[in-house]
Image: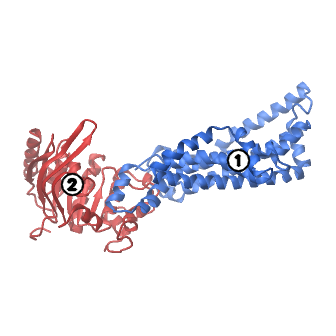
Amino acid sequence: MAVLDRVDAPASPARATGAARRRRPWRDRLPPVVAALGLLAAWQLGAWAFGLPIYIAPTPIQVARTLVTELPVLLRNFGPTAVESLIGFLIGNTVAILVAVVFVHSKRLEAAFYPIAVFINTIPVLAKAPILVLIFGLGMTSKIVIAAFICFFPTLANMVRGLQSVNPPSLELMRVLSASRAEVFWKLRVPSSLPFLFSALKIASTTSVLGAIVGEWIGADLGLGALIIEATHNFRSPLLYATIFLASGWAVVFFAVIGFFERRVVTWKPGEAP
Amino acid sequence: MPGIPAAPAVRLERATVRFVSERGAVTALDRVSVEIPAGGFVTLLGPSGCGKSTLLRLIADLVPATEGQVTVLGGTPASARATRQLGFVFQDSTLLPWRSALANVRLPLEVGPRKGETAGRRTPGELLRLVGLGGREAALPHELSGGMRQRVAIARALVTEPRLLLMDEPFGALDEITRDSLNEELLRIWQETVTTIVFVTHSIPEAVFLSQQVLVLATNPGRVRELVDCALPYPRPVGIRETTAFVRVAARLRALLETC
């Protein structure tokens, strides 16, 4: 921001509106907050007006109360899910980045293995999960593997595209400078790929939570996925809703953290080659 | 600079460049023979497709010669490139968007076989001041105007202290006012840095204003039409564009281009 403030003449209208937005954040954040509160109020009033039984549709107040009273149970189940999604996220993305680097350096390996990666990606996670639980057991390992799998493909596809997104004149510049292959990779390809990588990481941050939960559905003693199954079977709807709320909240926090790092790292405007 | 009899900076002998495209073989340059004197300022002028950019890229070792001989600074284009004696300024500035102006100027010192060598007498910061961008070291490229970005690109090309500076329509995308002021600055920089400059343009006034000699190229296939002397004294003030001598050279170039 300090850099932007020193600029005397705006280089583009897009930046000017960006600065304006930072100056009055409440005006941009107000509409979604009002809309969310309005929907919650309508839900609460609707449940009262139609007299719906609690196991079909608990009211927001009942869900909020459950969040407090059942907090120990929720937190005990939240731990494994958070760990599984986090480790799965790290493993899946790390492997995807490494494979993307290999693909970019070897057209032959890319041609051989990319279709296989696409094929594995087309198998729905609900079909993949039981297979992986059979292989890796009912513990956390199988959930970590499922979360890693679900992160893998979007990051691979984006990273391959990102590493290849270097514009040709920049490559000519590096040639004039007699830059080595490694220098072109680190100084040109890797930075060019970062906007693509962060788009993929934001997708992966939410899907890794989804992967961990789906894995827990198939078979687990602990975890938000296991709790969802248990609460549904016992008609404990307020607990079910509270669990979903917690799972979504975790995914949103995860997403926001990645977004925070993205703004720190990608300070330029991608897609524009000055 | 002038008056020193030295080996030519660039020497082409019947240099031919052919590309193979979908429509078959295209001759971009046909048996071009020319000598560019050391310390000189030579402009390549011609209509689109006359091969002026190809000629520049041939000197920079970005395209190979199909036939003929190319000598750059006494060796092959590849050796001149590998020993970092070439600077190249592209039509679009090709700054790395994630690097500040200063870090972009520093890039050539961070890559290549002779990186880390602080051969330059001028530091990146001094070069930014030389091109009139002192105080904007931290600015990212998208925060700079097109003219400022080209200034950064020129500073970057100068950081290795090249003996030969190749410029491929560097001001082609700029408005006329910016272009005129950058032309003046380029002449000042040329006289301060003592390099040979080969400059590509399709603007007649720009060619006359800048150069000692204008190499007029004809199209289809790209070949040398004529080498025209611009015997106007340096330093050249902006007002030189209205003098008879200037107008006469410009008229001669225009007449040549019409028969290309």
Q: Alpha carbon of mark 1 to alpha carbon of mark 2: how far?
A: 59 Å
Q: Is residue A231 left or right of residue A4?
A: right
Q: What kind of residue is marked 1?
A: Ile
Q: Can you say whether A237 is above or below B129 in the image? A: above
Residue A99 relative to residue A71: left or right? left
| Colour applied to chain B | red
Q: Residue at x 12, y 50 (%)?
A: B31
Residue B61, label in figure = none
* In this rendering, position of residue B258 left or right of residue A38: left
Q: Position of residue B249 (x, y in %)?
A: 8, 49
The residue positioned 75% from the left and 37% from the top of the image is A36
Task: Specify whether residue B48 is in view.
Answer: no
Read off the chain for label 1: A
Q: Residues within 10 Å of mark 1 (few under 14, many from 20)?
A: many
Q: Which mark is residue B199?
A: 2
Labelled disc at residue A146: 1
Q: Sort mark 2 into few (<14), some (14-19) or many (20+) by Cα contacts within 10 Å.
A: many
